[in-house]
Amino acid sequence: MVSRFPVSNEFISLRDAMDRLLADSFVGTPLRGVWASSSNGSAKMSLPLDVYATDNEVVIIAAAPGLRAEDIEISINQGTITLNGKTPNVAQSEEAKNATWYLHELPHGGFSRSITLPIDIDAANADATFDQGILRLRLPKAEKAKPRQITVRVITNEPEADAIEAGR
């Protein structure tokens, strides 16, 4: 029998099966891009991003709740910006030792998020700030990528205008 879903010997919980069904059925669910199930039952975090450009710069804003600035690595290579890091597992914290867990859904583990920009940037002058779980990365546009104003000259084919211009 042909099945739409791949068959494996791996155990899958009813909850994971329902999560997959909902994720496959409803495009645009609120948390679809934030957490992705991994095979060991933990959730893998994917940083949600906002990206916009002004005349002078590109700004990337990432929501990174529970992280510190030193937990995030930023690299730029040929117009691709990559954010890497690791979210700690609160179940392994000192505070949670010998605790009885009833629910453990917070995402933990490594994350990586890359975005390729359609314009050239000046990576040497990039600036990153981190405040209350929000990373703001400012990437100045390269001079050749910035918008320019071009003055329009008037050309006349009238002999009088040409004579006046020549007599200046």
Image (cartoon, helix red, strand yellow):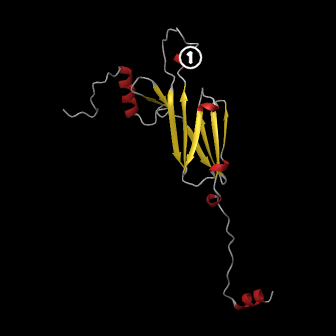
Q: Disc 1 marks which residue?
A: 93
Quarter of the image for the C terminus: give it: bottom right
Q: Looking at this view, is 84 or 57 the one in front?
A: 84
Q: Looking at this view, is 82 or 156 the one in front?
A: 82
Q: Secondary structure at mark 1?
A: loop
Q: Amino acid at mark 1?
A: Ser
Residue 61: image quadrant is top right
Residue 78 location, x and y as percent?
54, 51
State the residue at coordinates (38%, 24%).
Answer: 16
Residue 100 location, x and y as percent?
50, 8
Residue 166: image quadrant is bottom right
State the residue at coordinates (63%, 34%).
Answer: 134
State the residue at coordinates (68%, 73%).
Answer: 152
Relative to 52, 35 lies left or right: left
Q: Residues within 10 Å of mark 1 (few under 14, many from 20)?
A: few
Relative to 45, 5 lies left or right: left
Would you say residue 63 is visible in this rendering? Answer: no
State the residue at coordinates (64%, 32%).
Answer: 69
In the rendered view, tell whether residue 71 sits above or below residue 52.
above
Q: Looking at this view, is 3 or 92 the one in front?
A: 92
Would you say residue 33 is visible in this rendering? Answer: yes
